[in-house]
Amino acid sequence: MLHVFPDLASLSRAAAEALVNIAARAVAERGRFTIALSGGETPRTLYRLLATDCREQVPWPHVHVFWGDERFVAPDDPRSDYRTARDTLLDHVPIPSESVHPIPTLMPSPEAAADAYEETLVAYFGSPWPRFDLMLLGLGAEGHTASLFPHSPALDEEARWVVAATVPADPPQRITLTLPAVNHAAHVYFLVSGAEKAAALRAALTDPPDVHACPASGVKLVNGELVWWADQPATGRLI
Ligand code: 6PG
């Protein structure tokens, strides 16, 4: 499903309202709402809305926050996805600290961090796969999502939930959930803004899926709802 909005502000507001509904339903049905956050710039507007206009609508004491990927940098590094979420959202809402589950980047290696996070997820969700109530994802201009970049060996991973990856971006060392881990989520929301994403959005939505060329096209939920939230400029190549 694709929802198109004039701009990032209206896209983010609509996605925030939908997120609130998923959270309310999850808490009513299972007593908790599990969300995996994405990094980068696009979700910042949504995060700020969740910390302000939507703050009272989110059942924060029952929310558990995870990440779909992370840069292998210190938690207070400005490039850290955890730092971004803290600055724009988590430091401004009444979420219990024990409900925030960052990817541990103060480990000896990205591989050790990936192993540790996989253990965290297995302990929390149990087998066979993690089932996040909602996973937020972004889209890179060349089609990457999370830290799954074109032609990465991580794209062929079928058993691991979390792997280390070296990517052609700064910083190069990353930890990322794998496609099977993503694809078992109950809901996945892609937030896509800007004309520079138009070619990637077209590749992800219309061309025959080629996961190695466009990793985002590999997001096909096993049993869940996939929604693309895009602004007008990002849809410029769809018509
Ligand atoms: C990250 C994200 C990454 C991001 C895309 C889009 O850690 O950087 O997980 O997948 O979502 O690169 O980033 P922008 O929103 O900044 O365009």
Image: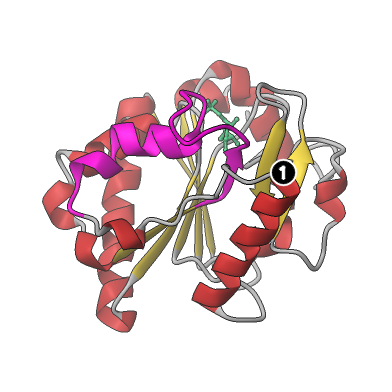
Q: Can residue 177 be seen in this view?
A: no
* Residue extending furthest toward the front: 108
* Residue extending furthest toward the left: 56
Q: What secondary structure is found at the residue carrying circle 1?
A: loop
Q: In this view, does 98 lie to the left or right of 221?
A: left
Q: Note whether 9 is above or below 94 in the view shown.
A: above
Q: Can residue 15 be seen in this view?
A: yes
**Number of disc labels:** 1
Q: Note whether 93 is above or below 97 in the view shown.
A: above
The residue positioned 72% from the left and 42% from the top of the image is: 148
How many C-alpha atoms fall within 10 Å of the one at disc 1: few (<14), some, or many (≥20)?
A: few
The residue positioned 62% from the left and 42% from the top of the image is: 146
Q: Where residue 21 sits in the image (x, y, percent)?
A: 27, 61
Q: Where residue 64 sits in the image (x, y, percent)?
A: 36, 62
The residue positioned 70% from the left and 23% from the top of the image is: 169
Report the magenta residues as a range.
67-94
Q: In which quarter of the image is ligand 1?
A: top right
Quarter holding residue 121: bottom right
Q: In this view, does 31 lie to the left or right of 137?
A: left
The residue positioned 26% from the left and 34% from the top of the image is: 48
In front of the other: 108 or 154:
108
Q: Where residue 31 sits in the image (x, y, percent)?
A: 28, 79
Q: What residue type is labelled 1?
A: Ser
Quarter holding residue 7: top left
Q: Note whether 134 is above or below 216 in the view shown.
A: below
In front of the other: 124 or 192:
124
Q: Name the residue under label 1.
A: 109
**Image quarter (top left, top right, bottom left or bottom right) of the C terminus:** top right
Quarter holding residue 106: top right
Please tell me whether residue 68 belongs to the stretch shown in magenta.
Answer: yes
Please tell me whether residue 182 belongs to the stretch shown in magenta.
Answer: no
Q: Where residue 42 sits in the image (x, y, percent)?
A: 45, 29
